[in-house]
C-alpha cells in the first residue's frame, strides 16, 4: 500500500475511468520514436491507465504506478503491464529499468524534488522523460464557455488545491531539471454530449473539496444553464496540452 499522498480522486475513481479524456495517440507515437529504446516504460501516476494502455501498445512492457488503490482497481488488465500501488517518490521499481518515464496529468501532485531523484534511479541512461498536462477546456462557443468558466473560476475557484496552480500556468513554473527537447504541438479534443461533460466536471480535484465544505451541488444548475446552449448534439471540446520532455544523462 502506498504511503500518504494528496488524494483527490479515489472517491471518484469510477467516474475518472469513464469520463477523463486521454491525451492524443500522436503524443505516444512521438514518445516511442524519441525514446532510446522501447523495452520498458514507466507510467507514473497512472490513474486508471489512461496513458498506460497506449504505452503498452508501443513498449515491450510498462510499469504503471499510482498511489491510489481505488484508481488501480478500475484499470484494465492488459498484457505487458504490471500495476503497482506506490507513490511517485518511492515506486519500489528496480533501478535502471525503463527507457521512458511518462507522467500524464499528475506531476503537479508530486513532491517533485524527491520524484526526480526516483526518476534518475529508475530510468536507464539517456531515458526519455515526458510530463504532460491539460487545464481549462473550451468549446469555442462564447455562451457555453462563459458558463464553464464561471463554474471553473468562480464556483470552484476557492476549492482548487494549491498544486493545481501549476496546471493553470501550463507547467511554466514547475521544476523540470532536464535539458528540454522540442516537442510538436498535439491537439487534444473530444466530441462530447452534455452528459459526458457533466461526468467530467464531477471528477475535478476541486469537486470533493467543494462537497466536503457542505455546499449545495452546483452542477445541476450549471447543466440547466448549458442545456439550451449545448443542445442535443455532440460538441467539440478542446484542451490546450502542455508537454515537457527531456532526457536523463547518458
Image (cartoon, rainbow, N blue to C red):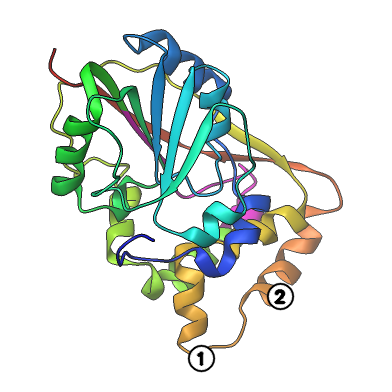
**Total tally of numbered discs in the picture:** 2
Q: Secondary structure at mark 1?
A: loop
Q: Quick check: 233 above or below 96?
A: below
8, 127: nearer the viewer? 127
Q: Quick check: 216 above or below 162?
A: below
Q: 10 Å neighbourhood of mark 1: few (<14), some, or many (≥20)?
A: few
* Quadrant in which residue 117 is drawn: top left
The residue indicated by pointer 2 is 220
Residue 7 magenta: no
Q: Earlier in the sequence, mark 1 or mark 2?
A: 1
Q: Looking at this view, name the residue that lies furthest to the right.
A: 232
Residue 154 in percent (x, y) is at 45, 71
What residue do we see at 28% from left, 50% from top? 166
Residue 133 magenta: yes
**Which quadrant is the N terminus positioned in?**
bottom left
Q: Looking at this view, name the residue that lies furthest to the bottom.
A: 214
Residue 109 in percent (x, y) is at 31, 55
In this image, 140 relative to 39: left or right? right
In this image, 109 relative to 193: left or right? left
Can the viewer see residue 134?
no
Can the viewer see residue 97?
yes
Magenta stretch, residue numbers: 130-146
What residue do we see at 30% from left, 25% from top? 97
The residue indicated by pointer 1 is 214
Amino acid at each position: 500500500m502506498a504511503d500518504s499522498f494528496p488524494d483527490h480522486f479515489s472517491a471518484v475513481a469510477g467516474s475518472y475511468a469513464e469520463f477523463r479524456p486521454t491525451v492524443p495517440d500522436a503524443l505516444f507515437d512521438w514518445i516511442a520514436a524519441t525514446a532510446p529504446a522501447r523495452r520498458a516504460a514507466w507510467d507514473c501516476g497512472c490513474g486508471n491507465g489512461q496513458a498506460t494502455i497506449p504505452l503498452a501498445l508501443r513498449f515491450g512492457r510498462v510499469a504503471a504506478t499510482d498511489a491510489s488503490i481505488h484508481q488501480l482497481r478500475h484499470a484494465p488488465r492488459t498484457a505487458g503491464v504490471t500495476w503497482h500501488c506506490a507513490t511517485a517518490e518511492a515506486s519500489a521499481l528496480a533501478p535502471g529499468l525503463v527507457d521512458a518515464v511518462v507522467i500524464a496529468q499528475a506531476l503537479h501532485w508530486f513532491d517533485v524534488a524527491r520524484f526526480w531523484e526516483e526518476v534518475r534511479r529508475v530510468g536507464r541512461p539517456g531515458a526519455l522523460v515526458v510530463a504532460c498536462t491539460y487545464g481549462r477546456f473550451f468549446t469555442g462557443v462564447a455562451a457555453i464557455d462563459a458558463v464553464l468558466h464561471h463554474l471553473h473560476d468562480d464556483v470552484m475557484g476557492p476549492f482548487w488545491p494549491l498544486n493545481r496552480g501549476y496546471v493553470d500556468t501550463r507547467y511554466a513554473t514547475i521544476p523540470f531539471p532536464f535539458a528540454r527537447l522540442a516537442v510538436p504541438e498535439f491537439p487534444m479534443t473530444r466530441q462530447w454530449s452534455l452528459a459526458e461533460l457533466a461526468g467530467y466536471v464531477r471528477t475535478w480535484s476541486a469537486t470533493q473539496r467543494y462537497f466536503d465544505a457542505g455546499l449545495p451541488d452546483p452542477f445541476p444548475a450549471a447543466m440547466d444553464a448549458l442545456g439550451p446552449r449545448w443542445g442535443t448534439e455532440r460538441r467539440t471540446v478542446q484542451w490546450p496540452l502542455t508537454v515537457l520532455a527531456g532526457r536523463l544523462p547518458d
